[in-house]
Amino acid sequence: MATGRLRYYSMAQFGQVNIAYVIPNDIPPIMTQGNPHFQRPMKTLYLLHGVSGNESDWEYNGIAEDIAGRYNMAVIMITAGNNFYLDRKATGCQYGTFAGQEVVEYTRKLFGLSDKKEDTYIGGLSMGGFGALHTGLAYSETFGGIIALSSALIIHEINGMKPGFQNDIANYEYYAEVFGDLDKLEESDANPEVLYSRLKAQGKEIPPIYMAIGTEDFLYEHNQIMKKFLEDNKADFIYEEGPGIHDWVFWNNYITKGVEWILNKH
């Protein structure tokens, strides 16, 4: 199992960024015998961290190596700060471009990864779950599947937020900087529902979506809104829930469920 981290200069983030990777390209045949995933070319999963996280989370707290070794899947983990993987106009603040285009192109070239949509997936937890949905829809021609766990689908909560307001996570200034005009947030490209509706109206192929949330998670109700939206649009998606809070016990359990569901789509 090839593991490590690297640093490269990102045009999107206007500076050096860190990437962690796990690539199952050296596993002895005796350890893959009988595993059907090693009878096909290797696929790639880009995993996104949550608020206050970084590229180490899915490796040290999560089960990136297990995913790679079990499913013959390169796992690429990035760092994008607390920016919800959204582009802003300011130089070096193109976090959506970074996650959905730049890092994909860079790692494909560096590691010789497949450039096929059906071999390329994106997933994440919390803020990264939002990021996986948003990035997967914004770059629907790149990703063949989306795995969104305990997603921070807070668009409707912070829409219309006014100066001086603050919730348990952050204040108005933070949300306005990350998401833009909060009075028009629900109609903006920062809203995954807007991206989905646009793809559907244009008749474009939309990646299948796996969603999961713990029933005791503080983001549970937010995920119900997205679930209903996808149901109303007859989306190719599956939603699962189970006992659990906003923690790695839940995410490590459901990431493999998501991977297996996405793999069965191809």
Image (spheres, grey):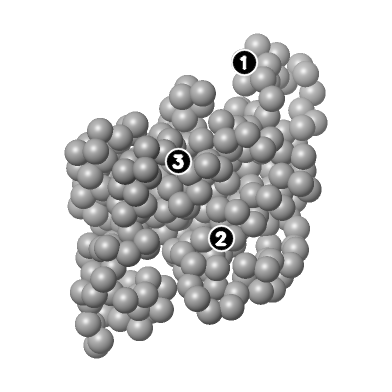
- Above or below, 32 against 100 in this view is above
Q: Residue at x 74, y 51 (%)?
A: 4
Q: Residues within 10 Å of mark 2 (few under 14, many from 20)?
A: many
- Above or below, 139 against 33 in this view is below
Q: Residue at x 51, y 56 (%)?
A: 49
Q: Amino acid at mark 2?
A: Thr
- Above or below, 52 against 75 in this view is below
Q: Amino acid at mark 3?
A: Ile
Element type at mark 2:
helix
Residue that label 2 marks: 97
Q: Residues within 10 Å of mark 3 (few under 14, many from 20)?
A: many
Residue that label 1 marks: 36
Is there a contact, CB below 8 Å, between mark 2 and mark 3?
no
Closer-to-camera residue (206/25): 206
Q: Residue at x 24, y 88 (%)?
A: 164
Q: Position of residue 21 (x, y in %)?
A: 69, 48
Q: Position of residue 92 (x, y in %)?
A: 60, 75
Asked whether residue 247 appears in the rendered view, the answer is: no
Q: Residues within 10 Å of mark 1 (few under 14, many from 20)?
A: few
Residue that label 3 marks: 146
Q: Image quarter for residue 84? A: bottom left
Q: Image quarter for residue 39? A: top right
Whichever of labels 3 and 1 marks the residue nearer the N terminus, that label is 1
Element type at mark 3:
strand
Q: Residue at x 37, y 75 (%)?
A: 180
Q: Nearer the viewer, mark 2 or mark 3?
A: 2
Element type at mark 1:
helix
Q: Position of residue 162 (x, y in %)?
A: 22, 82
Asked whether residue 201 appears in the rendered view, the answer is: yes
Whichever of labels 2 and 3 marks the residue nearer the N terminus, that label is 2
Is there a contact, CB below 8 Å, between mark 2 and mark 1?
no
Horizontally, residue 77 falls left or right of residue 222, namely: right
